[in-house]
């Protein structure tokens, strides 16, 4: 799957978690803009992991702050 | 992103004086100030002036029933336990002033480890200065770079800190979700070392893990399994070895972590294992090596208490009666509880919010009842909980008194 395809899949996965319907761009942050709390992060990460059949460890999550970084990371992980 | 997993949701930022290293605590300071401004007694600075028994103390001048300690088996005032401590103080002094691997291993430490090996019927036992350090040390040491730790999202802080201290990849899964755990285990790259970390009883809600299924899945996936049995020792399982024993999987568990600060009634932590190379931990586990060993009186009280817990079946039965009565009674009164049925000696009462939780906590305290107020981030799903933990020494009459106190306080605060 290329980056664009990953982007569109994650875009649909994020919808139920994006309660305030924030416009999502590559620079959108999870903690700041989307106001994800700990439970939301866990459920959202689990949804992505299951969809792409990958693991995003906490160590990797710590490096991901924005939507764009997430798409990059998933693109890389599912290619491995 | 994962920051949020260990932090409470943030209230909006307001100005709080000059910025320095303490500015990061402003949200917590404000949360506390708001709570105290509402007039409640500070739930996090209670002082017990006198302790009358495992179930009664004088708190802020009031005779109070203790329903928020981890003194499950009431061993703190056991005469044999106290005598053992006094004898050790007389014969071995107040402290060891040294590490377990240097001058800090006395006969008492060896006897305490022997008591644990006998209690668990396992080959190796290692005593740490606290249970917190046992988790910190074992997890951070055995799971290294390139290894994976797969753990329940509701794990105790000491487990999370053990993960943070090590260099392994950390992969949490949804609480008690067997399927979520299995999926993550299966995705781990071929050849990587795997450690699954579970708890027998989860202390916030008092619920038990489906260890039978989880341990089987972990083994099938080639992982080692560590189970923290802090809140089950002494009263769950045929010999009181915990939930893994109760569910018949203790032989497949590689490491059991426990503490002396709950059923055993003193302080200290341990890990027991049948792994043939386990003894090497004494040299490579930093939270074991670089700290002073427990005082002789503490290991003597612990060893005596552990040996007595092997024969505690009457007390155990009474503890379960207490748990069932309290759980059933609170449910009948209309409180929302953490579990549908009583699964352990912990009964968690779910509060609608922190303000009413603190109000209820204070109302109970003025009735003469101490329970634990638990709030985010220590609690799952950012809940505010009043956690009740029962003791085998609570009498039937005390449990009825407690229910009366909950009824009056609950009505006064408007929760039931
Ligand atoms: C599940 C669990 N593990 C470990 C610990 C730490 O035990 P200790 O009080 O001996 O440090 C606790 C107690 O707070 C606990 O609840």
Image (cartoon, rainbow, N blue to C red):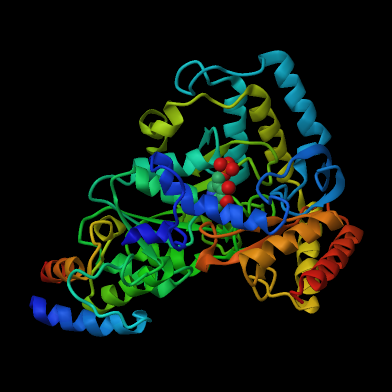
Q: Quadrant of the N terminus of chain B?
A: bottom left
Q: From the viewer's perspective, tell me whether residue A63 is left or right of residue B268.
A: left
Q: Quadrant of the C terminus of chain B?
A: bottom right
* Residue sitting nearer the eye, B190 or B4: B4
* Residue sitting nearer the eye, B212 or B204: B204
Q: Position of residue B109 (x, y in %)?
A: 58, 26
Q: Position of residue B351 (x, y in %)?
A: 66, 69
Q: Position of residue B369 (x, y in %)?
A: 81, 55
The residue under the point 77% across, 46% down is: B74
Quadrant of residue B344 in the image? bottom right
Q: Is residue B157 above or below residue B410?
A: above
Q: From the viewer's perspective, tell me whether residue B60 is left or right of residue A17.
A: right
* Residue sitting nearer the eye, B128 or B369: B369
The residue under the point 70% across, 69% down is: B342
Q: From the viewer's perspective, tell me whether residue B70 is left or right of residue B409.
A: left
Name the residue at the left extreme: A2
Q: Is residue B347 above or below residue B161?
A: below
Whether residue B305 appears in this view of the structure is yes
* Residue sitting nearer the eye, B310 or B286: B286
The residue under the point 76% across, 74% down is: B414
Q: Position of residue B53 (x, y in %)?
A: 84, 42
Whether residue B254 appears in this view of the structure is no
Q: From the viewer's perspective, tell me whether residue A73 is left or right of residue B314.
A: left
The residue under the point 59% across, 36% down is: B268
Number of callouts: 0
């Amino acid at each position: 799957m290329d980056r664009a395809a990953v982007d569109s899949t994650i875009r649909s996965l994020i919808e139920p978690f994006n309660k305030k319907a924030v416009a999502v761009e590559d620079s959108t942050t999870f903690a700041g803009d989307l106001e994800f709390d700990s439970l939301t992060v866990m459920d959202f990460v689990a949804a992505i992991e299951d969809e792409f059949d990958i693991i995003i460890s906490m160590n990797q999550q710590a490096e991901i702050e924005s939507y764009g970084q997430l798409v990059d990371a998933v693109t890389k992980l599912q290619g491995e | 992103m994962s920051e949020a997993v260990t932090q409470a949701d943030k209230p909006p930022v307001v100005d709080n004086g000059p910025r320095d290293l303490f500015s990061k605590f402003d949200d917590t300071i404000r949360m506390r100030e708001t709570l105290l401004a509402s007039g409640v007694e500070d739930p996090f600075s209670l002082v017990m002036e006198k302790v009358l028994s495992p179930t009664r103390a004088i708190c802020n001048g009031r005779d109070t029933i203790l329903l928020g300690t981890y003194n499950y088996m009431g061993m703190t005032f056991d005469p044999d336990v106290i005598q053992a401590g006094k004898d050790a103080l007389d014969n071995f002094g107040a402290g060891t002033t040294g590490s377990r691997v240097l001058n800090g291993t006395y006969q008492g430490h060896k006897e305490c480890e022997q008591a644990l090996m006998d209690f668990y019927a396992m080959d190796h036992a290692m005593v740490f200065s606290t249970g917190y350090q046992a988790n910190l040390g074992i997890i951070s040491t055995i799971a290294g770079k390139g290894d994976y730790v797969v753990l329940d999202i509701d794990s105790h802080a000491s487990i999370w800190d053990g993960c943070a201290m090590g260099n392994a990849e950390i992969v949490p899964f949804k609480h008690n979700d067997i399927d979520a755990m299995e999926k993550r285990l299966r995705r781990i790259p071929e050849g990587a070392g795997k450690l699954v970390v579970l708890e027998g009883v989860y202390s916030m809600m008092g619920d038990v893990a489906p260890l039978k299924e989880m341990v089987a899945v972990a083994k099938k996936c080639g992982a080692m399994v560590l189970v923290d049995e802090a809140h089950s020792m002494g009263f769950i399982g045929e010999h009181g070895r915990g939930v893994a024993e109760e569910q018949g999987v203790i032989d497949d568990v590689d490491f059991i972590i426990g503490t002396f600060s709950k059923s055993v009634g003193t302080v200290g932590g341990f890990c027991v294992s049948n792994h043939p190379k386990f003894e090497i931990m004494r040299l490579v586990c930093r939270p074991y090596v670089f700290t002073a060993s427990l005082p002789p009186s503490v290991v003597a009280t612990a060893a005596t208490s552990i040996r007595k817990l092997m024969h505690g079946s009457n007390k155990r039965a009474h503890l379960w009666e207490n748990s069932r009565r309290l759980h059933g009674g609170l449910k009948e009164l209309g409180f929302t509880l953490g579990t549908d049925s009583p699964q352990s000696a912990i009964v968690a009462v779910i509060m609608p919010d922190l303000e009413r939780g603190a109000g209820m906590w204070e109302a109970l305290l003025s009735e003469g009842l101490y329970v634990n107020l638990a709030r985010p981030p220590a609690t799952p799903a950012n809940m505010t909980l009043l956690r009740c933990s029962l003791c085998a020494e609570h009498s039937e009459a005390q449990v009825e008194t407690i229910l009366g106190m909950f009824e009056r306080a609950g009505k006064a605060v408007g929760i039931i």
